Image (cartoon, rainbow, N blue to C red):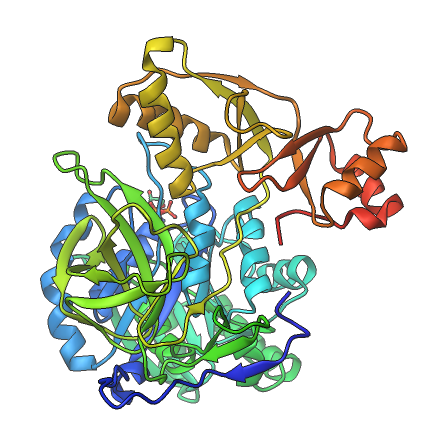
Amino acid sequence: KLLGRSVKPLLFAETVESVSNKAPEAEINRRRNLAIISHPDAGKTTVTEKLLLYGGALQQAGAVRQKAEQRGTQSDFMSIEQERGISISSTVMNFDYNGKRDFSEDTYRALAAADNSVMLIDSAKGLEPQTRKLFEVTRMRKLPLFTFCNKMDRPALSPYEIMDQIEAEFNLESFPVLWPIGDGDRFKGVLDRMENVVHLFIKSVERGGKADVQQVPMDDLETLEKLIDDKELFDKLLEDRELLDELIPPLDMDRVSAGDLTPLFFGSAMTNFGVQLFLDKFLEMGVKPATRVAVNKDASSDDVLTVSPEHEEFTGFVFKTQANMDPKHRDRLAYVRVVSGVYEKGMKVGHSRSKPNKKYNLAQAQALFGSDRSSVDVAYPGDVIGINNPGCFAIGDTLYTGSNRVAFPGIPSFSPEKFSYIRSPNPSDYKSFRKGMDQLLDEGAVQALRQRNDDGGGPLMLAAVGQLQFEVVQARLKEEYNVESIMEPLTYSLARWVNSGWDAVDKADAAGKLFGIMIVQDRWKRPVLLFRNDWKAASLADEEKYLELAPWSQ
Ligand code: GDP
């Protein structure tokens, strides 16, 4: 929707008394933000942990449960941050609930807050269903995508096979930056194709599992042959190197930044091999906090503005909200990605959905390291901070200083594939049930659908991408609001928003085109059709173009 409108730089009214909120260039330039996407068990938690070990301050926004071994790493990384002078925010969102892991909408939203994405692949398995789903989002956002093939210490697919899968399924070329030498027990190390140096991996038990690495120039064949100590792998390395140099065009960073070419890495997070190399390359190649588009809500026409990190005023948007993180306090947090300017403790901000003169005091912000939080007094573009949510900050909302009413585009909700009615079996619990449901819907834990024209009295249907989202809703209703709930699943498997509106629905209905399709409305009373299978949705979209069917609302 933003395309086709005029794009203008954001201009600010010059007011003499206004203090500049501009972020120092050095702070903007040293920040890199990344979201790690993967199928469960590919090693996201393990990689994050190693990034913490090697990287600077790494923010992990909103991990619901943190793995025990991660806690020890924090003292290390503050000093490393000073050494490296670089800070990385990672909006890793692992969702771990009662030991089960599944898709979480949060991961999609984390991508909205990130400037770079890392696709983590289990090298034995290649692309898996959730990698595919998440890839669609990085593609939609045109984020630079880095690919890390993990678990090379286990028997793996051939690296050529992984490249082929990425190309065939995602129509995306890859550029091998690191190339593996062997796999499983014979995983010897990687060739850094940019530096023409081989990093040999020498397992070390004494150094707390940290790998000893020996670097040998690729041209020093004699030493290489001796250290690789495996004739077959040595010959293969020479052959691969020649083949890759012949087949792969030189690295085109413009294509990487546009998300058209993915730099490819191989390693083993568990044995600490390749992660540091990856991090070093990522810091060189990743994009710094990016300029974003927004609309100016003051303007009579809906002007599109561009907001750069260097912009004079503070702007940021909410991409996740969460309640009751600490069971002792009924706290509510909104996670804000800073887009421009400086967050300062105690600053007053406007809010895109409140009245223009209403200001909110951001008394406290927290940096989020897993489940640990520490308060921060300043934050810069690229950072993610957690602020107290008085209840009115919802996903997609913009916070800003200055006289312009900036609103970043909403964060799309993803197309649900599971549908179920939910109700409370005990009429006496109704109030708590409503309160709990409202909170969970505000957080975007699931989406709500209702029958047409239902103002809230009729049956409540929940829509989600994965079954676990329903289970989480039920468990949280019980734990946090002490209410039981009953779910009655429906057999629909696909939702399409009718972006041309209710008249179009009526037209199709009158013509008998909606037989077997359920007509419902979302929270904003926009029409949604539920289908039992893909082809039915595809044929309706094809035959009745005026409906403007889409997998999500626009
Ligand atoms: P996540 O679900 O993506 O967060 O995955 P985890 O980091 O929890 O890892 C899933 C499992 O794979 C755990 O048992 C890890 O110990 C294991 N794992 C992670 N990285 C590696 C690796 O490089 N090699 C091997 N062999 N196992 C790994």
Seen from the viewer's position, the closer of residues 193 and 347 is 347
- 272 or 495: nearer the eye? 495
Q: Residue at x 31, y 82 (%)?
A: 28
Is 372 located above or below residue 509 in the figure? below
Q: Nearer the viewer, residue 108 or 366?
A: 366
- Looking at the image, residue 482 sits to the left or right of residue 1; the answer is left
Q: Left or right: where does residue 519 sit relative to residue 32? A: right
Q: Position of residue 503 (x, y in %)?
A: 77, 42
- Identify the residue shown where x is 36% and y is 59%: 268
Q: Is residue 150 visible?
A: no
User: Closest to the observer: 255 or 234?
Assistant: 255
Q: How many marks?
A: 0
Q: Residue at x 28, y 84 (%)?
A: 22
The part of the image, by quadrant, that contains residue 204 is bottom left
> Residue 528, how many percent across, how many down?
66, 38
Q: Which percent across, then down, holds residue 489?
A: 56, 20
Q: Is residue 407 left or right of residue 8?
A: left
Percent x, y of residue 518? 71, 27
Residue 350 seen in the figure: yes
Tell me which residue sits at (38%, 9%) in the image.
427
- Quarter placement of the N terminus: bottom right
Question: On the rendered image, what quadrant is the C terminus found in?
Answer: bottom right
